[in-house]
Amino acid sequence: MEPAVSLANVVKAFGDRRAVDGVSLQVSPGHVYGLLGPNGAGKTTMIRMIMDIIRPDSGQARVFGRPPGKGVRSRIGYLPEERGLYKKMKILDVLEFQGSIKGASPADARKESATWLERLGLGEWKDKKVEELSKGMQQKVQFIAAVLGRPELLILDEPFSGMDPVNQDLFKDAIVDLNRNGATVLFSTHQMDTAEKLCRGIALINQGKLVLEGPLVEVKQRFGKNTVLLAFEGDGSFLKMHPAVGTVDDYGGYSELRLRAGADPQDLLRDAAARVRISRFEIVAPSLHNIFIEQVGGRSALPAGTGPHA
């Protein structure tokens, strides 16, 4: 089967800065795929090239095996990073208009829109003007506009940005349902916890370059099962100086510990049990959050022997 989306050595520069620098990736049909990276990494530029809003300077973008543009646009739902709605129009009228652009009759567009408005908690607001809604409510309306007509490919640029946990769950559930019903979902985010739970494939982008790409399970396997999840009661300051520990991501009574090469986790367990009361000790692959921090050159974890207790 043709990939739903493919990029082949794509480059896009703005002046002297390469926003996307030789990126290649493939999104398999029916998958949820995450474009991950810090702000300014090039995620939105990549999405705009997939949507044919801008063109690459070199390389090729393909959607369903064809060049982006009119030939495939009707098969795509798109939530842009820069939200925009007709503020003086009533919500249901806006959505009817958006549905009609995708070929739906006014009656069908209003019926589908009303169902989505109820699902996302906006049923009582359907006759209000867009300008009367909060920013989060407007984001829901634009999400509905993107999913009208059950597109084969749903492209969401930072869909969870600015959302509270309740509304993030509403969006997450909607994305999962759309995917179960056959939609391929490509979304950008810098929220690693959400991506780790939703995505089957990822591309990690930093400064326009592809850092990691592939099925999430395989990406995590590359880093090995050398992380210990430790939940405890007591003073865990000794963990930063333990000889088995390379880095510590410290949350107080919970830590993610990256082990040094060749370290025996049983030594750590024995020493920890002698110092603190342990409620969880689990050896796992590193979290996507910590892979992200390590690969983009940030610093979430403290090297052993450093910090205020060293």
Image (spheres, rainbow, N blue to C red):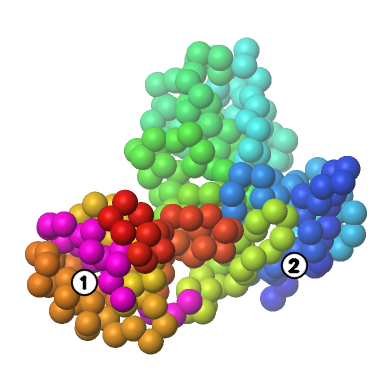
Residue 239: say if magenta: yes
Q: Quadrant of the N terminus?
A: bottom right
Q: Quadrant of the C terminus?
A: bottom left
Compared across the picture, whether 245 is left or right of 200 comes to left
Which residue does the image show at 77% across and 54% down from the upper left? Answer: 20
Residue at x-position 30% and y-position 67%: 241
In the figure, residue 240 lies in which quadrant? bottom left
Instruction: Verify whether residue 103 appears in magenta.
Output: no
Image spot of residue 212 (x, y percent): 61, 68
Tell me, yes or no, if residue 284 can be seen here.
Answer: no
In which quadrant of the rendered view does residue 306 lie? bottom left
Which residues are the magenta region? Answer: 223-243
Report the residue marked by disc 2: 24
Q: In the structure shown, which secondary structural element does the residue marked by tag 1 occupy?
A: strand
Three-letter code, disc 1: Phe
Name the mark nearer the viewer: 2 or 1: 1
The residue that label 1 is drawn on is 281
Q: Eyeballing the image, is 143 above or below 6?
A: above
How many labels sit on residues?
2
Would you call the spot at circle 1 few (<14 residues within 10 Å), some (14-19), or many (20 or more)? Answer: some
Is residue 166 something one can see in this rendering? Answer: yes
Residue 119: percent from left, percent from top: 40, 37
**Residue 110 at x, y percent in the picture:** 56, 30
Circle 2 sits in a helix, a strand or a loop, which is it? strand
Viewer-proximal residue among 158 and 180: 158
What amino acid type is highlighted by mark number 2?
Ser
